Image (cartoon, coloured by chain):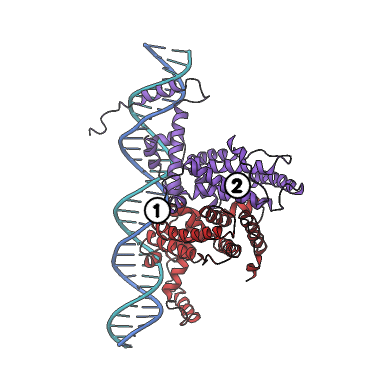
Chain colours: A red, B purple, C blue, D cyan
DNA sequence: GCTTTTCTTGTCTAACTGGTCAGGTTATTT
DNA sequence: AAATAACCTGACCAGTTAGACAAGAAAAGC
């Protein structure tokens, strides 16, 4: 007793805040949307550090500063919460699948793509890590996505790169593996940031690092394709 | 009843086999060594697929075809078993930290290093995946190793590559990130093999793939460093 | 053959965790 | 202001799991 004394929480204040700050902004910035975001963010942090089974709903609740039963109010089950979080991540992932055509300049397109991927790795390392963990464990939730959307995307891009090659715009390299190389080298800075920061004795990445890494990767990868990186696109 | 009937297991046979096939081969190829290997291998398979917490000792026992209590007989606890498995992996990892000196030919050394890393990714994907998962989750068990051994190793190699650069043997690139690039691009074929195989619609990698990947990575990465890959070392 | 050590294994337990639920409060609508 | 809907939350339950343990079987040592 005493601990359970006050049912007078700060909830009403929180609700007003949410309603006030985003009055008619987004279609659904209700209490629901606000709390769901909070929970999804907390879940991301916990799932990254402890894996699916290693994360308890209680831990997510604690991090989201909500009672555990609330998590179950907003998300039917742990599996559902995880699914929703993973959907958000793949959506974010797909948003970077930039446009390119066979008429474009390979150097420009690849430079821009590498920069985008590096920036995403720096801004959303946890998203990348959860995606990576999912693939490492055999892609149980993403197999369909890979077989359909990703494979399709890959074929389109391969076709374009191959056309660049046959136009003599770049050296003849294996375009499929070129894309894998860009993926691996950029995502590495998210997934392995602990290793990289520890080895280089840094606490966190800075803008300077991001620029340097982007330049390095562009130089080596594009150079390996017989291209001169076009850094002018980096300032756009 | 009936299920628990026969305590007459095939254990005596198993012991004799183990003793016979490796009479005085290894210092400790006793029943203990034999079963420990079996358990460690089973643990690797389970931990990769389900993570630390998601793996039950029962699941490891089932895969190792031993009663659960036996696992606890050989390994005091789950944490201990995991630790031992991780030690084995880092040992395997360190074994590839090849020798190089500033008098060597960069093209030869890097080609050989890339090949070694690709081959290791293909032969031990699970080891790579467990290592990756460990780093992704913040390297709780490997932080010390990274701060000491890996950082030290990195500094030695960086020094050598920088000396190659100042000798004009290769283009001036960031040697630290060059090593990260080799790590990321090669390990990707282990950690993300599910993704790669699904996208390319393959069931498994073949020797041909391994050769092709090695050549591709050598061409692009060495090319990006202003080097001509020396594939003659690949036949050694 | 006898003793000691190593190994085997079914059973039990204490702790944890996902999920439920009923009884409440607060917001919204009419 | 009354009624309805949305939200909150402590308490509870059922299933799972790491680990302990004791009693025995096999192997090794003497």
Q: Quadrant of residue D1?
A: bottom left
Residue B66 versus residue A188 in the image, above or below: above
Residue A3 versus residue B160 in the image, above or below: below
Residue A92 versus residue B6 in the image, above or below: below
> Residue B218 has which mark?
2
Please check whether the numbered discs 2 and 1 fall on a single chain. no
Q: Position of residue A112 (x, y in %)?
A: 59, 65
Name the element at disc 1. Answer: loop
Q: Quadrant of residue D27?
A: top left
Residue assigned mark 1: A140
Q: Residues within 10 Å of mark 1 (few under 14, many from 20)?
A: few
Q: Position of residue B118 (x, y in %)?
A: 55, 43
Q: Residues within 10 Å of mark 2 (few under 14, many from 20)?
A: many
Which residue is nearer to you in this view: B76 or B136? B136
Q: Position of residue A94 (x, y in %)?
A: 47, 64
- The residue drawn where x is 73% and y is 49% is B165
Name the element at disc 2. Answer: helix
């Amino acid at each position: 007793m005493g601990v359970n004394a006050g049912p007078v929480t700060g909830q009403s204040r929180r609700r007003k805040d949410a309603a006030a700050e985003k009055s008619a902004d987004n279609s659904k910035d209700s209490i629901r949307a606000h709390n769901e975001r909070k929970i999804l963010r907390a879940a991301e942090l916990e799932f990254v550090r402890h894996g699916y089974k290693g994360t308890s709903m209680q831990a997510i609740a604690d991090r989201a500063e909500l009672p555990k039963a609330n998590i179950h109010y907003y998300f039917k089950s742990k599996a559902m919460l995880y699914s929703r979080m993973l959907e958000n991540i793949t959506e974010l992932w797909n948003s970077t699948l930039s446009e390119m055509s066979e008429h474009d300049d390979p150097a420009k397109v690849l430079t821009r793509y590498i920069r985008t991927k590096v920036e995403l790795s720096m801004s959303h390392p946890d998203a990348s890590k959860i995606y990576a963990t999912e693939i490492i464990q055999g892609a149980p939730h993403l197999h369909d996505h890979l077989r359909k959307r990703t494979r399709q995307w890959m074929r389109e891009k391969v076709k374009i790169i191959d056309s660049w090659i046959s136009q003599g715009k770049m050296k003849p390299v294996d375009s499929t593996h070129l894309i894998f190389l860009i993926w691996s080298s950029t995502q590495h800075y998210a997934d392995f940031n602990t290793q990289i920061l520890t080895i280089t004795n840094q606490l966190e990445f800075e803008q300077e690092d991001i620029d340097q890494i982007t330049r390095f990767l562009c130089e080596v990868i594009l150079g390996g394709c017989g291209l001169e990186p076009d850094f002018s696109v980096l300032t756009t």
